[in-house]
Image (tube, helix red, strand yellow):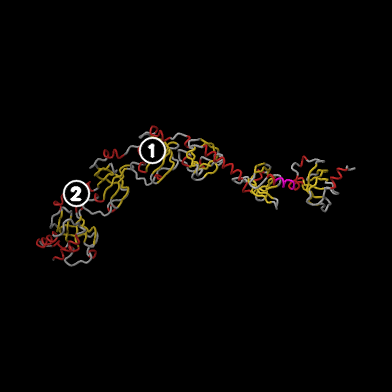
Amino acid sequence: MLTMEEALKQSVVRFAAGEIVKGVIIEVRSKEVLVDIGYKSEGVISGSELEDFKSVKIGDEIDVLIEKLEDREGMVILSKEKAEFRKNWDKILTICKEGGTISGKVKAVVKGGLLVNIGVEAFLPASQIDIVPPRNLMALVGNTFDFKVVKINQERQNIVLSRRELIENERNEKRSRLLADMTPGDIRKGTVKNITDFGAFIDLNGLDGLLHITDMSWGRIGHPSDILKVGQDIDVVVLDINKEKERVSLGLKQKLANPWDTIESKYPVGARVQGRVVNLVPYGAFVEIEPGVEGLVHVTELSWTKRIAKPSDVLKADQDVEAVVLGINREEQKISLGIRQLETNPWDKALEKYPPNSTVKGKIRNLTSYGAFIELEDGLDGMIHVSDISWTRKINHPSEVLKKSDDIEAVVLEIDKANQRISLGLKQLAVDPWTNIDKFYKVGDLVSGKVTKLASFGAFIGLEHDIDGLVHISQVSEERVDKIKNVLKVDQDVTARVIKIDKGERRIGLSIKAANYSQEQLKAEQAMLDSLKPGEDLVALQHAFDAADDTK
């Protein structure tokens, strides 16, 4: 029988949906428990509502909320969690206000964030979990953290939390302390937080510092990721601090001695060094001779004799090379290197091997409008200017008498070591016929030859001794000739009279129509030619002859 006290207690219990009552566990099943609340029917509670379902035993007393008095099976539907929420809500409101801090345990992952048990269930948005939202939210389930209460909605009985704000506040406090304690030259431990093209951001336990790519190594770095990885722990040197902007510049290479401090004693001018080609540019090649020390081989220092358009024609990236130190500028951290200095400069012996007036042999390597290049030895060329091909004939282009790859002889005219030029002559192999022109031809002589070239003003006639004479169009016939090609053809044999010799100007004037002239007629024609302006070459005689015709 019930005691009077027990009867009085039970008499005040209201069995209605929404009421909180005490109950006793009378049966433990696989996924639920049966609870006796003193009602005509037992109640059911899901095992997921019990924190430690395995430790639940018969006889345990718990507070429950009546959700439904009777379901279809006549059972009472109960909830332990809702009972606790109802009891804790008022308690939470007394100890927790918006902006306050409270401890809670992450219960589950839900859409948009996490469900946290702080005595009642509260919502933690994913954006408020950490400064950088974690990828794996399930890893946080079961962990207890401190949270900031962002919002409380009493009508809906829900609470929104933020862990990120607490972390940011903590980092701000740490940042302020670090900035106050930090001085340039300090060595600090940090973690690589982010890597960019220009450097890496290092987390100094609450304060981010920038490690610029130029301060990572004394040597060349293609990209910061070549030597650093996100999450890597490193020791860095504090280079500069801007407390107002909360910016810190960091260095990694400053932990090591600057190799340029002893560069002059290590690599004296004239020393041979080994290195690796690290960069090719249009004007030269950069060679790393030790980490942090690079020298430049200018394109002009690659070869004594060859004109190299760009370094990539003879060098490749990562190629191991030997070079000679030409100069050092420690202040600007520059070293000038040369590769051609590894060999003897052929121009130093050029004057000895090819003295002026000596005869040399070579192969025609190239023809240009102004001359022919003759290869005397590997990488050493001489040039025959177009004016030094013939004593007597006007050569417009070397290809008129020379062919590429032909072997020829020539005379050394001059060696210019400073500009690395050797001047050669072809005509100097023979005596200039004009020095003896008086012995070969006199005015009035009758000569024979072949037409070598036609022009609008006349024709060139090839004579003996490799000399050309000019027959002006007015000297072809007594009758007026409109076009020279109507009366003369190349390779045609002709007989003409020498009517003018200008030794100074190296010109011979011929006349076909004067071949049968008497001495008196010849003298008159010669007088007309003597009136020509001095200094005109054979080609320019056209205008002079026209002027002479007009005076007749």
> 329 or 164: which is nearer to us?
164
Left or right: 442 in relation to 146: left
Left or right: 530 in relation to 43: left
Q: Amino acid at mark 1?
A: Glu
Front: mark 1 or 2: 1
- Residue 134, image quadrant: top right
Say what secondary structure mark 2 lies in.
Answer: loop
Q: Residues within 10 Å of mark 2 (few under 14, many from 20)?
A: some
The x, y position of residue 2, in whole percent, is 88, 43
First in residue order: circle 1 vs circle 2: 1
Dominant SS type (magenta): helix
Give the residue at mark 2. Answer: 432
Q: Residue at x 26, y 55 (%)?
A: 396
- Residue 305, image quadrant: top left
Q: Amino acid at mark 2?
A: Asp
Q: Residues within 10 Å of mark 1 (few under 14, many from 20)?
A: few
